[in-house]
């Protein structure tokens, strides 16, 4: 617990809070100001909106200890506020609430809009209010209410709305561009990801500068494979199974999946599979993933390795999924793996290649599968 | 939906913040406005042992006119930039205005957004296109990196564990400069599916065209930018943009490719309108 002092609805408050207590919980549980509603608790729905130093903010993703010395104003603190009074009447008249859960956040966001953008039209109101969700979908009434207050205030204040003259932009004169000082970090991913019924599949390939037989041999040596994957650990293994752990770091996120995998090898086709699943004990997320690989003779003593990773993820980590970020991650992973594999195959017997301490994968696609799904699909 | 326990530290100055980060062996995260980190903490996707709050450091909260460029502190919020209308850099306000929602912009910071390095975020796209510079503080003092080299991939940047984005330096646009920015969002304020930014500044001989919301860091389309500088919008067609994207962003899925081609074309169109 840390001591904090701040102002809540005009009154000085001295209290203690754990660093992890967010402002919304502090207001509701400690200050008993339950007008602030908590909806999603991860900054998406806007129900918990309060004013921090006069500016609307989401109290679920502001920590109470970070609000030391700030002035907080919750929905309970607007009793005498003229603009809020107008909004209350308008919300009532326009039937701008049904269940009312989103209303405290809607009112605080609407008051900020009315004061900050007195000439807002309907489009602007809708854009500005888009961060506050109404699960009853009663947006028409809400927008009508806000527009009516804007109208009322424009009529009453005789504001002589300032219209800025459009600035003339000079005619464009073609020019020869100087070479940019900076080139981007390199082309982005070229991986295919296919959504399947069971999970998502990523395909990739790389080439190693060693003959097929040698590469085939090392793919059967699980501790060696794990050693090439930064972050992977194999705790026990047989020719057909393994147990282990995959730890990884992706931006601020860290996870460690412990699990088991079954191994398959088809000597004649030079094809194999690692089918695994695991659990991240901290988040309680479960991942399933199958990595299949096939080796091809690429000529001149080189081997082409084709990899397909089919994965799915369940649990808290699956909620945070977006875009094709995982593909980028897998690309980097495969590149690291290929580089380490090359180094290992080229190293004299007994010498361990340097493994970049970046990320991890092993225990059977767990991580790959986890990450792919984690950020795969849908924003 | 409650964060796991962590310790919270409010350092007095930038060296104090750097020292705290350096002393915690990678288990600390700097906290700006917490608008990306906060959700990750609440969902327990991130579990740092220590948060170092840099959002109140005065040295990182100023916007200064440096003549040829503006120096914007790393802890300056998006809404402060939105409301500032910086002379010669009003485009910064336009970019800021379309980041997420006002409640997010009131707390989210420009330095935090860059350090978080979400591939679909606005500043990691806009700042390279504006030829900005990122100022980084670490144990050895300050260093500067061109914005186009700062981001290394999804959630990966030039920053070491004990470094901070203390400021960004954004060159002022010449009066005849053209700026265009476009992003496709499923819903207003959400992270885009595709985005693009163009700067044509004849006086400075600067032609920039960048695409964002990719799987990794935003990418530049330099040859197409140079062609636009010579021929204006005539250089831009479905074919020319597709060809440029083939080089910079190979292997895109058809839907993403379609969105990115259109985002680039609209960014250019906006710049010349």
Image (cartoon, grey):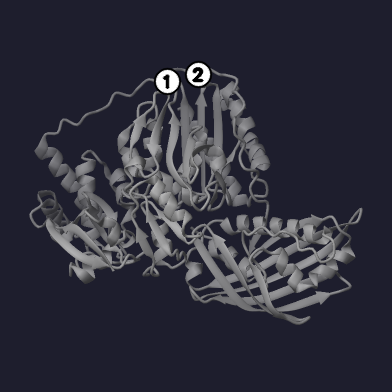
Question: What residue is shown at x 39% (from left), y 45% (from top)?
Answer: B14
Rendering coords of residue B251 (x, y %)? 67, 49
Image coordinates for residue A156, horizontal then vertical, percent: 9, 39
Q: Quadrant of residue A208?
A: bottom right
* Residue that appears at 29% across and 65% down: A136
Query: Which chain does the residue under circle 1 lie in?
Result: B
Quadrant containing the N terminus of chain A in the rendered view: bottom left
First in sequence, mark 1 or 2: give its number: 1
Q: Helix, strand, or loop for circle 2?
A: helix
Q: In the displayed structure, does residue B265 sit left or right of residue A59?
A: right
According to the image, label 1 marks what residue?
Answer: B175
Residue under numbered circle 2: B203
Q: Position of residue A144 (x, y in %)?
A: 22, 51
At x 48%, y 46%, the residue is: B139
Say what secondary structure mark 1 lies in. Answer: loop
Whether pointer 1 and pointer 2 mark residues with C-beta atoms closer than 8 Å, the reply is yes
**B270 to the left or right of B259:** left
Say above or below: B207 vs B147: above
Q: Nearer the viewer, residue A37 or A364?
A: A364
């Amino acid at each position: 617990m840390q001591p904090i002092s701040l102002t809540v609805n005009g009154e000085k408050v001295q209290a203690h809070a754990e660093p992890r207590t967010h402002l919304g919980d502090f207001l509701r549980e400690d200050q008993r100001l339950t007008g602030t509603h908590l909806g999603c608790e991860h900054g998406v729905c806007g129900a918990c909106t309060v004013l921090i130093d006069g500016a609307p903010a989401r109290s679920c993703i502001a920590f109470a200890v970070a609000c030391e010395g700030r002035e907080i104003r919750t929905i309970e603190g607007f009793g005498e506020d003229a603009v809020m009074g107008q909004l209350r009447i308008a919300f009532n008249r326009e039937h701008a609430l049904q269940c009312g859960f989103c209303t405290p956040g809607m009112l605080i966001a609407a008051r900020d809009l009315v004061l900050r953008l007195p000439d807002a039209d309907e489009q602007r109101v809708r854009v500005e209010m888009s961060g506050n969700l109404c699960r009853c979908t009663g947006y028409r009434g809400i927008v009508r209410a806000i527009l009516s207050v804007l109208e009322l205030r424009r009529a009453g204040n005789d504001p002589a709305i300032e219209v800025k003259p459009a600035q003339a932009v000079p005619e464009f004169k073609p020019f020869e561009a100087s070479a940019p000082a900076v080139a981007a970090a390199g082309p982005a991913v070229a991986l295919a990801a296919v959504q399947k019924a069971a999970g998502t599949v990523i395909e990739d390939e790389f080439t190693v500068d060693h003959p097929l037989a040698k590469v085939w041999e090392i793919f059967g040596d699980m501790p060696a494979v794990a050693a090439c994957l930064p972050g992977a650990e194999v705790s026990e293994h047989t020719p057909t199974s393994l147990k282990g752990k995959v730890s990884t770091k992706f931006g601020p996120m860290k996870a460690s999946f412990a699990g088991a995998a079954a191994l398959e090898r088809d000597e004649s086709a030079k094809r194999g599979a690692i089918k695994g699943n695991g659990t991240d004990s901290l988040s309680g997320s479960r991942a399933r993933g199958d990595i299949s690989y096939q080796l091809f003779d690429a000529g001149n003593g080189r081997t082409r390795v084709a990899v397909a990773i089919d994965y799915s993820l369940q649990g808290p980590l699956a909620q945070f999924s977006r875009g094709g970020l995982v593909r980028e991650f897998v690309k980097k992973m495969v590149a690291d793996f290929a580089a380490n594999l090359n180094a290992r195959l080229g190293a004299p017997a007994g010498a361990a290649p340097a493994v970049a301490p970046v990320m991890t994968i092993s225990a059977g696609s767990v991580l790959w599968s986890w990450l792919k799904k984690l950020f795969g699909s849908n924003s | 939906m409650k964060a796991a326990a962590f310790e919270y530290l409010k350092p007095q100055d930038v060296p104090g913040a750097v020292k705290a980060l350096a002393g915690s062996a990678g288990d600390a995260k700097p906290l700006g406005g917490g608008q990306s980190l906060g959700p990750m903490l609440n969902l327990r996707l991130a579990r740092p042992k220590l948060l170092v709050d840099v959002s109140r450091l005065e040295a990182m909260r100023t916007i200064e006119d440096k003549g040829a460029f503006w120096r914007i502190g790393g802890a300056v919020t998006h809404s402060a930039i939105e409301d500032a209308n910086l002379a010669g850099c009003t485009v910064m306000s336009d970019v800021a205005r379309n980041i997420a929602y006002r409640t997010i912009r009131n707390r989210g910071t420009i330095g935090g957004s860059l350090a978080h390095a979400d591939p679909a975020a606005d500043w990691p796209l806009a700042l390279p296109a504006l030829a900005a510079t990122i100022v980084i503080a670490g144990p050895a003092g300050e260093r500067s990196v061109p914005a186009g080299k700062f981001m290394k991939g999804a959630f990966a940047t030039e920053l070491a564990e004990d470094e901070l984005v203390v400021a960004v330096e954004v060159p002022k646009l010449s009066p005849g400069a053209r700026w265009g920015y476009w992003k496709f969002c499923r819903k207003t304020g959400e992270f885009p599916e595709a985005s693009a930014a163009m700067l044509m500044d004849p006086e400075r001989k600067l032609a920039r065209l960048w695409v964002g919301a990719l799987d990794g860091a935003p990418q530049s389309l330099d040859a197409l930018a140079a062609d636009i500088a010579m021929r204006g919008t005539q250089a831009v067609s479905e074919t020319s943009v597709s060809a440029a994207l083939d080089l910079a962003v190979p292997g895109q899925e058809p839907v993403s490719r379609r969105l990115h081609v259109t985002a680039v074309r609209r960014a250019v169109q906006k710049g010349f309108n």
